Image (cartoon, rainbow, N blue to C red):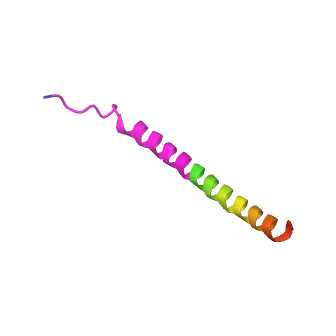
Amino acid sequence: MQRPDPNHRSSGAKAIAIDERAKYVRYRLYMLITLLISSGFALGLHLIFGR
């Protein structure tokens, strides 16, 4: 039976990569929500004042 090597870390890099990807997905979600709200606001202004 082999002893675990204390210098060998495989989960640390994966956790950092998953964390970075989750941060990127959250950023894209916020950008999508901002885009939808701003386009809805612009459409509302156009419908109110565009006539």
In this view, the residue in front, 33 or 21, is 33
- Residue for point 27% across, 31% down: 5
Q: Is residue 26 left or right of residue 31?
A: left
Q: Is residue 2 left or right of residue 11?
A: left
Residue extent of the magenta highlight: 2-26
- Residue for point 35% across, 34% down: 10
Q: Position of residue 23 (x, y in %)?
A: 53, 49
Q: Examine the rendered structure and indicate whether residue 36 appears above or below residue 15.
A: below
- Residue for point 75% across, 67% down: 44
Q: Residue furthest front?
A: 51
Q: Is residue 26 left or right of residue 43?
A: left
Q: Is 30 inside the magenta-drawn segment?
A: no
Magenta highlight: main SS: helix
Q: Position of residue 27 (x, y in %)?
A: 59, 51
- How many marks are shown on the rendered structure? 0
Q: Is residue 36 left or right of residue 41?
A: left
Q: Residue furthest left?
A: 1
- Residue for point 46% across, 39% down: 17
Quarter that holds the N terminus: top left
Q: Is 12 inside the magenta-drawn segment?
A: yes
